[in-house]
Amino acid sequence: MHRDPQSRLRNNKIKVQWRSSFLFTNQKMTMNGIKIAFISAVGLWHTGLAAHSTVSELAELSLQELLEIRVDSISTDQASEDIAARWNISVGWYSQKLDGYRRGTTDFSIDEVLFEPGEERVYHNFPVVPTVIEQDVFTASLSYRHSEHSTLSLTVPFVRQATDHVSSVAAYEQFMIKTDGIGDIGLSWRNNFYKDEVCQFSIGLGISLPTGSIGERGDTPREAGDQQLPYTMQLGSGTYDLKLGLGMSWYFDKWTWVNDFGYVQRMNRNDRDYRLGNRLLLSTEVRRVINRYLTAGIGIEYQNSADINGRDTEIIVPGPFPYPASITDPGNFGGELIRASGSLTLRLAERQSALITYGRPVYQDLNGIQPKSKGRISVSWTLGF
Amino acid sequence: MVCLLTWLAVSVQAQDRAKIRQQERDVKAAIVFKLLRFVEWPETSVLQDEPLTLCVWPNEPYLETFREIQGSKVGSHSLEVALVNPQNSEFCHVLFGSREMAASTEQWRSVSDGKSILTISDSNDFAGKSGMIHLMMRDQRVSFAVNISALENAGLRMSALVLNLAEIQSANTSLPQIQTPVERTNEHP
């Protein structure tokens, strides 16, 4: 007759506990004894969750009995990362939309921003107004885990942008400008410098190379033919940008709390004599494993970016108001943004997963007057091998 | 009060997690120990009454767990636990590497190729990658798969009694790697 191996081990433990309580009774339990018993009971309730036996005790069981023991493996989260693949390829799509205007925390309508002949021209109205800006970035990444804790990654983005405009310039009342091409290629290194049963800390260092064009041209009302386009329509920063990241994750059963810090430092000015603003990013996200195929998360992130330093003199016009559109003024960039987001991670197959994230700003305090950020969606697929 | 309760909850969760992980290690280590009794090494590899040496990589999280059963009898041999050194692995009869160690196929081969060393791991699809015994989780129980040709190539034999308990199944899937903090800042413009 086969005996349940867990109950066999448990019975041994119960015998020991019963003997202890019997001894307690014989010694006429005092008030302190009651307290100790209560604390012990709480402790036993807690430690009883695992009904833990030592390896020496387990080694006394037969192989068949050992194979029947229920083990609450942690393979759903942290342990899975322990067996992460050496190589990972990933493709992704990220899309964001900017629509409407805001200065600081005050919203402005398109009519308020558009300068019409006969109105007073001031610093916050313009003869050309982008109405909707759509940016899509397709990424291809390859990462290599060269040691237990360190991973090198290469990311190549393809950027596609389209901006709808209205203007008070004859023949350009409504027009659209599109640009597309390779963006700034990123190289990064990540090191999980501390990892234990409940938390993991990582540091990331990276650089983005100025491979994206900053000389995109198109037809604008500024003059006839193609001209240099504003900053938002360019495909790259034009500078070598250093990136620093810190990641801290805590694991509680099926829950994971992920905290990230990121900073982008732009180096010098580019060939067009400007540099985009440095950027700080802080984010926190709580994820829960729903089942072996699905993990859901909600999070919030804070972004702070500076305005543009220097300016591209080819996109300004002569006169007291040199900026024909808000996006040609280097002061109308950057600010603070808080975004709430939700994510779903789908495990599609062996070492193959998809991540879907949707975020929406809940607070924006923008420098100058500039288009407001709307929803942002990203989808990525990763394969490890 | 809220901080205290939060701290208490976090600390309880952390303890539970560590316990669960240790329990998994204990069960797997005990299974490894039991499996050794059913393996036959060539007579020249381990002499009668000589210790049977189980080698692990330096920093192996299972090291202390195995040390708890060091000295236990495996047939006529007593179990010894030692750290592996690729330059000098002649004394190893068993090589165990956990998934936490994530040793590469080259590292395994550098130690075990051409020798009668039993290789065991709980890394993904270990038996399918020329490893000999792959420990895996199935329905919250530990099961194992055996790569018989790898065993035979090393001159080892395993009892048919144990092979009846072995099974082959696909390894656990893994979650994607955590997004690199740097990558999260890689937005445009």
Image (tube, coloured by chain):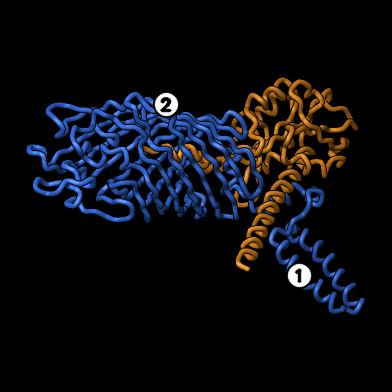
Chain colours: A blue, B orange
In x, y percent, where is residue A168?
A: 11, 43
Q: Is residue A316 left or right of residue A299?
A: left
Q: Nearer the viewer, mark 2 or mark 1?
A: 2
Residues under numbered marks 2 and 1 in contact, where contact means CB atoms less than 8 Å apart: no
- Decide: few, some or many residues near mark 2? Use Cα within 10 Å; few <14, some 14-19, many ≥20: some
Q: Quadrant of the N terminus of chain B?
A: bottom right
**Numbered-mark total:** 2
List the residue tagged with mark 1.
Answer: A41
In this view of the protein, can residue A143 be seen by the observer?
Answer: no
Q: Is residue A215 left or right of residue A260?
A: left
Using the image as rendered, state which of residue B100 and residue B54 is in the foreground.
B100
Using the image as rendered, state which of residue A77 and residue A62 is in the foreground.
A77
Kindly identify which chain the residue marked by label 1 belongs to.
A
In this view of the protein, can residue A29 be seen by the observer?
Answer: yes
Mark 2 and mark 1: span between their CA atoms? 61 Å
Query: B111 above or below A358?
Result: above
In x, y percent, where is residue A181?
A: 30, 28
Q: Which mark is residue A104?
A: none
Q: Amino acid at mark 1?
A: Ala
SS category of the residue bearing label 1: helix
State which tag comes first along the sequence, 2 or 1: 1
List the residue tagged with mark 2.
Answer: A209
Q: Is residue A99 left or right of residue B4?
A: left
Quarter-of-image position of residue B160? top right
Residue most extreme to the left: A170
Residue drawn 19% across and 33% down? Answer: A317
- Decide: few, some or many residues near mark 1? Use Cα within 10 Å; few <14, some 14-19, many ≥20: few
In x, y percent, where is residue A55?
A: 78, 48
